[in-house]
Amino acid sequence: MIQTTFGKIFGTKNDRELKKYNKRVKQINSLEEKYAALGDEELKAAFEAIRQEVLSEQKSLDNVLVDSFAITREASKRVLGMRHYDVQLIGGMTLHEGRIAEMKTGEGKTLVATLPVVLNAITGKGVHVVTVNDYLASRDARDLEPLYNFLGLSVGTILEKSHDPALKIAGYEADITYGTNNEFGFDYLRDNMSFSKEQMAQRGHHFVIVDEVDSILIDEARTPLIISGPVSRTLENYARANEVALKMEKDVDFTVDEKDKVVLTTEEGIAKAEELFGVENLYAIENSALSHHMDQALKANYLFVKDVDYVVKEGEVVIVDEFTGRLSEGRRFSEGLHQALEAKEGVSVKEETQTLADITFQNYFRMYEKLAGMTGTAQTEATEFSQIYKLDVVSIPTNVPVQRIDQNDLIYKTEQEKFDAVIAEIKALAKIGRPVLVGTASIEKSEVLHELLKKEKIAHTVLNAKNHEQEGEIIKNAGAKGAVTIATNMAGRGVDIKISDEIKALGGLCIIGTERHENRRIDNQLRGRAGRQGDPGSSRFYLSLEDNLLRIFGSDRIKTIMERLGVEDGEYIESKMVTRAVEKAQKKVENLHYEGRKSIVEYDDVANEQRKIVYRFRNELLDQNFDIKSKVEQIRSEYVEVALNRIEIFDGGTREDFDLERLVLAIKEECNFDLDLNALENREYDELLENVEEQLKADYEKKMAQVPDDVQRAIEREIYLKTLDRSWRDHLYQMDSMKTGIRLRAYNQKDPLVEFKKESFNLFTELVEVIKYETIKTLQIIQFSMQDPEEEAAALARQQEIEQKQLEMSMELNLHEDDAPLVEKKVARNDPCPCGSGKKYKNCCGQSGPKKGAFATV
């Protein structure tokens, strides 16, 4: 109350920010005549002049903002035929300052972005613009390229379907790069799995603008990007577990908690499962895989619904994104859940995968020096943006006041009554020719409505995940006279629905929501499809007590209200009290999701620090100026000291007590080298240390003398890289395993996050040692199977090329329940070899053991 009174007297924080921006808007407007009077070449020269002032560090970006915005607006008028409104200038300043600009649908966010993009591209460091799909990335880059080119700036696109490394590199070399969030994130991971600097596409993380920032940084924050490879595990247990799950009885053998999405097996259920599986103890170590498969099979059958959570398309289980309603092609649930769904649906069960590299969107986008975003709906998550991303939200006023009428929700007892009312309303509106956009929460419900409208012979179009390729066109036409469009939650984000004057006279576009989403923002996005740029329009949600949100989170209270009011079948209630109860249920779910995302980022922050250290060192290794020779000598020295301590050849005694034979055996076993025992006798500890190191070094240098220095360095670099990658992969697997069980420590009154930090620190310390000492052992062991140094170098380069090609083949996005692995496509033994030799893989680079053209371990 005090805050409200304070706000009325002094204005809210948002009001004060807008006041500050309006002062600069006046300065920009005052330059309009000056730049309008210039010819095209003069305008370009004026822009080039401010660019040079920034590059020579005479002025900062903030110093030239007013001129840059004024020139960009003038160039846009000439090239695109569009002049930025004053509110768009405010949006541009908000983005330049690294904040979120909340702008209503139809306010021209795409054009707003051009202002900070041009200003920040002056530095030459590269500006990234992130959109939610390839369609929008291609459209925006294509439509805005003439403006950027006019000002001497180049434009590139990074699309999911394009895996040509040369195109990728060219895309990132441009001054301005458009692409999807997935592709930017995956390119970062791919770069950190490459074998040379030349193969790396990205050139730093300076300034990024994220369009639909709430969708990418909030909704998708629970699905980290993971590149993964296959794990050899038996697949028949999935079908077996599915059969057992179908024989279990709900509420007797297991219980389902829809709110927390958990299935719990009862004592009776465990006994029944043991009998069905034919084992004595389902939770014995040897049966742990069976118990895991059964848990996932129960989830697949009783928590995941076909045409809501996933669809079956061309013999494959394809995930439906819960926020956009789109099919997530290529994504897979992890931890065996996707395999359980495949067994449930009777399609081919594919093998599980193991993490090779991963990162959350939170940590990827926080790498940028400056992060900004745009959306129509951000205030509901302002706290999360502030706490996780250090981003302020500024609400930008509309250019023209919103005329849309948002009506109260209508609540019915049953879903059937609700749908009857929706059909009646659509019928009435279709008669007068007023366009209707009907929003549904799932594919299943969109198809129920489709059947009902077919029965009533009402012409309509369905836009759901099954036909999202035509999304842009369907949404564009949703404002035509008499158009009835049924859409899942994606509702064509980023595409405007334009209406004619005739439609405006009929009341504009009518939005009908058939269910409240768990998140208020999704509902607001649906509403926002109508009423753009001061157009008339209306919106209303039709709900029932059988809707998931009300059934799971809030129906008891609403049911009581309905019974008190004596609502009959077919009747509804329209009450602010009920609308508030629905919002309360939504807030409850939003908080649950926020806690989930917060937990994910807390755990990933631990891994992120380790990731940064490993990737930084990996990049150093790829640098040709890195002194790999000195590094090898340093780790050999460390290895010898650690080896002597580990072997415990002495117990603090005199040199006569040293167990030298044990030392010789250990070095032979680990490095395949016979130490000269005589040279070690009668030496003090420090002398012994020095002598062992000298003997190993002499043996190594003698062997390496067979090849030129540059080949030596290339071999050392590659061995170090491969050891690092393999060890990092194993480390990620250990981290994943630990994370899965760490939460159980809460039962022992221990904070799981604190425990995770402790354990992961220990694991990381071990990782650093393993990378260093395995590298030195491998280098000491390797022998050459040929004498031609040029052939040796060519073999090395060819091996790297093969591995890079295999890596590129493996880039398919997968989704975790909370994380997100990625399936790697392996080269089959009878496939043509990727090296281009024309032979089968098994007869070429897929041969096991030493082969001509490569160095081999002995």
Image (tube, rainbow, N blue to C red):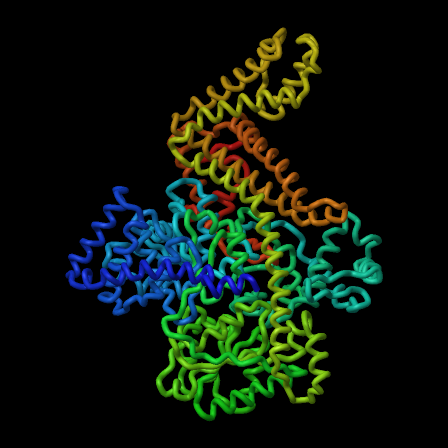
Residue sitting at 27 percent across and 60 percent down? 28
> Is the residue 218 above or below the residue 713 in the image?
below
Question: x, y percentage for residue 137?
Answer: 39, 62
Residue occupying the point 56% across, 55% down: 820
Residue 184 at x, y percent in the picture? 44, 53
Counting labels gives: 0
List the single residue furthest toward the bottom.
431
The image position of residue 338, as x and y in percent, is 62, 60
Residue 311 lies left or right of residue 789; in this view the side is right
Residue 711 rendering spot, x and y as whole percentages = 40, 30
Name the quadrant containing residue 57.
Answer: top left
- Observer-nearest residue: 183 or 665? 183
Which residue is most to the top?
A: 682
Please give left or right for residue 38 compared with residue 15 in the image.
Answer: left
Quadrant for the N terminus in the image: bottom right
Relative to 411, 636 lies left or right: left
Relative vertical location of residue 218 with respect to residue 491 in this rendering, above or below: above
Q: Is residue 132 visible from the viewing direction of this image?
A: no
Q: Is 594 on the left-hand or right-hand side of 295?
A: left
Which residue corresponds to the image point at 55% horizontal and 76% vertical from the top-left?
Answer: 440
Residue situated in front as seen by the camera: 142 or 72: 72
Question: Residue 242, relative to residue 644: is it above or below?
Answer: below
In this view, the residue in front, 349 or 624, is 624
Instruction: Examine the image and state in which quarter residue 767 appears.
Output: top right
Who is closer to the viewer here, 641 or 855? 641
The reply to whether residue 687 is in sight is yes
Name the quadrant of the C terminus: top right
Residue 450 falls in which quadrant of the image? bottom right
